[in-house]
Amino acid sequence: MRVVFLGTSEFAAGILERLAHHNAQRPVLVLTRPDRRQGRGRRSAAPAVARAARSLGLTVSQPESVNGPEARAQIASAAPQLLVVCAFGALIKEPLLSEHELLNVHPSLLPRWRGAAPIERAISAGDPRAGVSIMRLTAGLDSGPVCLAESEPIGPQDTYGTLAPRLQALGAEMLLRVLDLTERGHPPPFREQDEQGATYAEKISPDDRLLDPTRTAAELERVVRALEPHIGARVALADGSLLGVHRAAVLDSEERPGGGATPRGRRLEGEPHPGVGVSDGRLLLDCRGGALELLVVQPPGGRAMEAAAYLRGHQLPGRR
């Protein structure tokens, strides 16, 4: 089958690699986003899909707009039977939508978590399961009909870094299954999504990264896991600086320093305002209903380290 692949992210690169190693479905053309300046040095860097495609010996194009006439002409010249889209990062519009059949690999159990950050949002929300849906791309935001959806449990210790590879492997296997059935003339049936169950996974913003002490410790612990290791959560210190948080744990009332006398739902005595402090050698964020222990942190401009190592070089207020 002649397939053109559109994708940009690391997740999409993993799908592409699996597709490229399956000779019958090896893409004849890969389209991805232009190189962008990244990092503190603002150096130009190619998207993950561009790097993967070149290493696989695939033809790569990086148009400014995939909807423009030049990109559409390039796709048409490849004479594809199908376009496969995964985490492309830009809206695909008419007339491209009508010129080809497009299948989208989306890492969520649609209609839940349509949009840019479905894996992060599923972990943050405390969903028991995530998944992958194969759908027909339409003008709506991940709202097209679905032909296949399969789930994957989210464990209590799962981070984005542990869950995303499992979903990536699941999505690649599902895609190959759908492409094989389609090539043999037996495509799986599509079903419309239930709009009443739709939720949206907005792109992760700077505010989403900041641990808000008005939320519960359980909620914040999930945020830390959802953003680890690719984005990273942060907490504000009293001096206004932001401390990166790579690993954290909910501190139950029975575990609270000082004999566990502080019941869930109340702050420690003498702490009128929540914040980061130290108690019995532990680095704690006081928050609604309890405390979050910060286990692995990263100071501005520094490296990630255990909380004990951080405390040896930094003075923070003590907790009673």
Image (tube, helix red, strand yellow):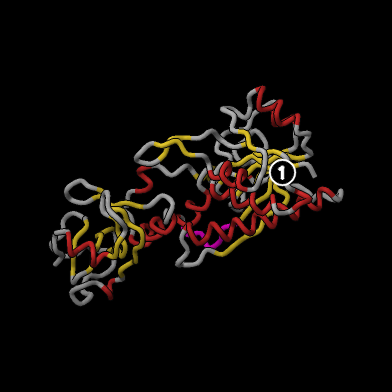
The residue to which callout 1 is attached is 27
- Where residue 88 sits, quadrant-wise, is top right
Question: Could you tell me the amino acid type at mark 1?
Answer: Pro
How far from the left and from the top, in percent, is residue 261? 21, 74
Give the percent coordinates (x, y) of residue 92.
Answer: 63, 32
Residue stretch in magenta: 126-131
Q: Which of 313 and 167 is in front in this view?
A: 313
Q: Residue at x 20, y 77 (%)?
A: 259
Image side of residue 27 versus residue 234, left or right: right
**Residue farthest to the top, as pictured:** 69
Numbered disc total: 1
Query: In screen coordinates, is 130 left or right of 94?
Result: left
Image quarter where the C terminus lies is bottom left
Q: Is residue 197 in view?
A: no
Looking at the picture, how far across and down is residue 170, in whole percent?
A: 64, 59
**260 vs 45, nearest the viewer:** 45
Q: Which residue is drawn at 27% across and 53% down?
A: 302
